Amino acid sequence: MIITEQYPCALVFLTGLSQLDVFEEAFRSKPFAFLLKPFDVQQAVVSIRLAVYQKKLETQLKNHQEELEILVKERTVELEKARDRAEEAIKLKTPFYQTSLFRFGNPCMEFWEFLR
């Protein structure tokens, strides 16, 4: 299991080994930074601050995505209900209009005929 999946942390990998296979192994743990010994303290501080900042942004993005997904689901339910009500209204209006036009004719046409 990858440590970042179990713990919500900003991982900075620090090693004295510079072989490519070590980097590949570290890369699978999804680190935010990779430091080789000996390291400069200022470089380490900057890397750690960047890692914390990136983790914060990642968390904010994830939270925002979850909020948007909830809003989309809620809105979808609202739209489906509105669609169902509209379809029901159409079903109820269609017979009324058909019988009204049959009984009364087209009111606009009758008005134009009256004006002639």
Image (spheres, helix red, strand yellow):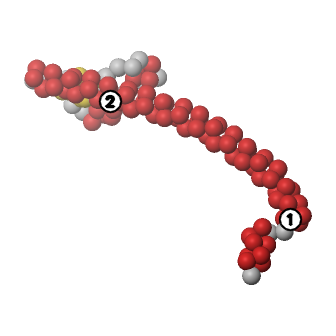
Query: In the rendered image, which quarter is residue 70 located in?
Result: top right
Residue 112, placed above or below residue 34: below
Task: State the mark number for residue 104.
Answer: 1
Question: Taking 88 as reference, is 62 left or right?
Answer: left
Tell me the element at label 2: helix
The answer to whether residue 82 is visible is: yes
User: Can you name the residue that lies furthest to the top here?
Assistant: 7
Q: Which residue is drawn at 59% across and 34% down?
A: 74
Q: Do the residues labelled 2 and 1 touch (CB within 8 Å)?
A: no
Q: Mark 2 points at which residue?
A: 57
Tell me the element at label 1: helix
Residue 94, placed above or below residue 106: above
Query: In the rendered image, which quarter is residue 61 located in?
Result: top left
Residue 43 in the image: x percent, y percent?
12, 26
Most foreground residue, 62 or 99:
99
Distance CA(mark 2)–CA(mark 1)? 67 Å
Question: Taking 56 as reference, is 45 left or right?
Answer: left
Residue type, numbered disc 1: Phe
Task: Give the number of the mark in front: 2 or 1.
Answer: 1
Question: Taking 43 as reference, is 84 left or right?
Answer: right
Residue 107 in the image: x percent, y percent?
78, 67
Q: Residue at x 82, y 59 (%)?
A: 97
Report the quarter where the C terminus lies: bottom right
Residue 95 in the image: x percent, y percent?
86, 56
Q: How many labels does the image show?
A: 2
Residue type, numbered disc 2: Leu
